[in-house]
Amino acid sequence: MTDWCVGAFLLALAASGDGAPRRKFVELGWDIVDTAYLRAHHAEMERNAPFDGAMIRVAGKTADGKPAHSEWCWDAVPWDRASFQPAVDDLHRLGMVRRSTGKDGPQFTLNTSNPWTRRARAMLNLVYLDPLLDDLSRISHKVILFGEAAHGGESLGQAIDLLIVTTARDRHKVLRALAASELNGRLRPTVVDGDELAALPHRNRALYDQVSRGLVLWER
């Protein structure tokens, strides 16, 4: 059920686009739409809503018939799986989940090729990286997330590619911060100083092109 909760909380409807990074405006107030509303109005929301994203509620019932939804997914109260089927069907019609047949009947998983769910996964990577960025902000000039992790790749556990611009003097501090990070097993960092960054288009054009399509997470 974790994937459903992640998707419900972090669904991003608007593409990030190219150009300079900007802050995203996802929600104002406490209004959270359910899956039925999203299915009925998603096209209008994408055209006219002043937001860069949306938060959605996946609703059903608890095992004893009381209302339940994805905002309460962190407690230990058992849910009635069948009661969530209409919400799952809504997400399936929107292309956000895939349906397959298992030994116990229909199975649903997030459709990671769908642009909405890819953006949600990319946002989740930013949440994971936040503690590391706090450390790097004191010893770097720029941090860029690039590759699959920047665009919501197929797996939540994919490698996290980072380009970190620092000084020759602080390079060892950056490497220590990376080694101490809880994400160390997933990190695939490239640490450069200013001169190495300037030479990157000539020395490694493929890497430069990937970085150019990435997300700037921090810049001094």
Image (tube, helix red, strand yellow):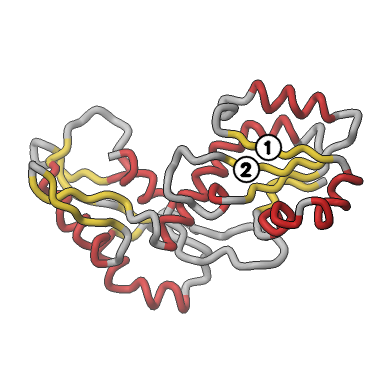
Q: Nearer the viewer, residue 111 or 218?
A: 111
Image side of residue 6 versus residue 196, left or right = left
Sequence-wise, the earlier of marks 1 and 2 is 2
Tell me how many marks there are: 2
- The residue drawn where x is 24% and y is 66% is 93
Image side of residue 100 versus residue 172, left or right = left
Image side of residue 158 versus residue 2, left or right = right
Q: Is residue 81 above or below residue 182?
A: below
Residue 3 pos. (x, y %) = 34, 43
Which picture quadrant has residue 21?
Answer: bottom right
Which element carries disc 2, helix, strand or loop? strand
- The residue drawn where x is 27% and y is 72% is 40
Q: Is residue 200 above or below residue 175?
A: below
- The residue drawn where x is 17% and y is 48% is 107
Residue 198 pos. (x, y %) = 88, 52
Q: Residue lying farthest front? A: 203
Which picture quadrant has residue 44?
Answer: bottom left
| Label 1 CA crowd tier, 10 Å (few <14, some 14–19, many 20+) | some
Read off the residue under disc 2.
161
Q: Look at label 2 and name its amino acid.
A: Asp
Residue 217 pos. (x, y %) = 68, 47
- The residue drawn where x is 73% and y is 46% is 218
Which picture quadrant has residue 165?
Answer: top right
Residue 188 pos. (x, y %) = 63, 37
Between the residue at mark 1 and the residue at mark 2, the CA separation in whole angstroms equals 6 Å
Read off the residue under disc 1.
189
In the picture, the quarter occupied by the N terminus is top left
Q: Look at label 1 and name its amino acid.
A: Pro
Tell me whether the residue at label 1 lies in contact with that at label 2, contact meaning CB atoms closer than 8 angstroms.
yes
Which element carries disc 1, helix, strand or loop? strand
Q: Nearer the viewer, residue 194 or 177?
A: 194
